[in-house]
Amino acid sequence: MKYDFDVIVAGGGPAGSTAATLLAQYGHGVLLLEKGRHPRFHIGESMLPYSEPVIRRLGLDWSEGGVFKAGAVFIDEKTRQEMFFPLSGEKLRAYQVERAEFDTRLFENAAAHGVDTRMDSPVTEVEYGRGGVNVVTEGRHYQARYLVDATGRSAMMGRRSRNLRRIETLGRFALYSHFGPLRGDLADELYATGNIWILMVDIGWLWVIPLPGRRASIGLVVRQRKPGGVDAETLFRRYLSASPRLVELLEGARQLWPVRREANFSYLNRKRYGQRYISIGDAAGFLDPVFSSGVFLALTGAARAADRIHQGLVEGCEADPALHRRDEAAHAIGFNTMYAFVERFYQSDLIHNVFFEAHRDAAIKRAISELLAGNLWSGDNPWQGTLLRGRFALETK
Ligand SMILES: Cc1cc2nc3c(=O)[nH]c(=O)nc-3n(C[C@H](O)[C@H](O)[C@H](O)COP(=O)(O)OP(=O)(O)OC[C@H]3O[C@@H](n4cnc5c(N)ncnc54)[C@H](O)[C@@H]3O)c2cc1C
């Protein structure tokens, strides 16, 4: 059978561009199809340090254009409790990035590694023949040995196979915007440390992420359905003006665009892979944004998938529907740890009983910092074991 490409990647976000670049580095012919056009806005600006090894494999320096992120500060203004968890270390560092720019760099980097990158190219159909996969975009058909579904929350393959399962117990919707320019002492402190702030409020929590150019991304994540009789902009503004810290931070700054909204963002794709395809990044599932794990799981999952696809292509066993089974455990550790962690955040007094009390026990504080940084596969974090034993793996339910 004649193939146009070894691999076709649908979706040019962080997951898709990463998988495409790594496969091209291995010497495979890759087509990367993005339905939109870079640069384009995307939410998800706070990164984790344990993404850095993947960024290095891509040949990129991610300090370029980002705001250094020392750690995360959890704050409850009502009780005056506050706790800082360091995240960046000597070897691995994290940044807060403008996604339009970050995603464009990753996409262009794929092209620089020899990937055939195309924008304005939505994948509209996927058909399986005996010897390969046939992908349709803009009326054109391409044959490949393998398909990577990196279509983000569109979750192309999971939706087709009806395997998406909503997770109802986490945040329900998020409202957010960008603000700037930020001036004053509090803003100076925010940029000097580059910390992400997580402020606890009665209906959920707020994020404050410092961005380049003295701007900040601020979002409100709400645990329930939207309260009736109040529009999104008013609800958002109400919570910003109820926080003395945010009032001070935003003094003299402008809201740069009207509030945007994302709802029902937490879900699991129960069939992540099958014959000649795998879903990665958000297409494999997405958890609540509270611990900023989205891009980290997208990058690490993309790297794992690319390595396995390479092996399959080299050994000629890429048509094996169980090709990715050997990576199930690694995927489950990453996803389930974050899931258990986020679930505890919402369903218990984790914040008040553990996070804000972490100064009492240096070992616990270190263990939490390691998880928040994305150190999930070392196997030596006692707190991770406790979290995972606290619930069954999602996939097995
Ligand atoms: C409110 C909110 C806040 C968040 N905050 C953070 C954060 O602070 N830190 C963090 O790490 N993560 C955060 N995330 C999550 C993060 O944005 C995602 O996890 C991340 O973007 C996943 O990358 P991806 O490549 O899988 O998907 P995406 O970045 O969504 O990329 C998917 C791409 O596929 C394209 N596409 C879709 N369908 C098709 C098709 N049929 N054909 C071709 N292309 C297609 C899309 O246009 C898109 O460019 C947040 C998410 C939400 C909802």
Image (tube, rainbow, N blue to C red):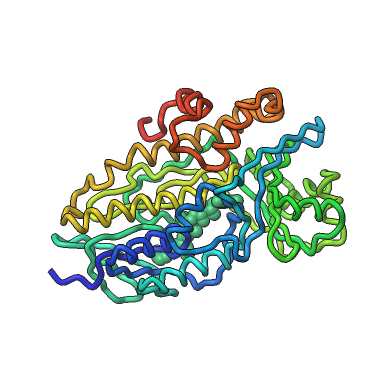
**Residue 151 in sight from this viewpoint:** no
Q: Which percent across, then down, holds residue 387?
A: 50, 27
Q: What's the residue at 22%, 54% (across, down)?
A: 312
Q: Nearer the viewer, residue 48 or 276?
A: 48
Q: What's the residue at 47%, 41% (across, down)?
A: 166
- Please say if 201 is above or below 256: above
Left or right of residue 151, residue 98 in this image: right
Q: Quadrant of residue 332?
A: top left
- Please say if 155 is above or below 78: below
Q: Which percent across, then down, holds residue 352?
A: 70, 27
Q: Which percent across, then down, holds residue 394?
A: 41, 33
Q: What's the residue at 81%, 30% (across, down)?
A: 79
- Please say if 271 is above or below 105: above
- Please say if 278 is above or below 118: above
Q: How many marks?
A: 0
Which quadrant is the C terminus positioned in? Answer: top left
Which quadrant is the N terminus positioned in? Answer: bottom left
Q: Quadrant of residue 329?
A: top left
Q: What's the residue at 28%, 69% (across, down)?
A: 29
**Residue 129 in sight from this viewpoint:** yes
Left or right of residue 234, residue 264 in this image: left
Q: Which percent across, then down, holds residue 90?
A: 59, 47
Left or right of residue 57, residue 361 in this image: right
Q: Quadrant of residue 178?
A: bottom right
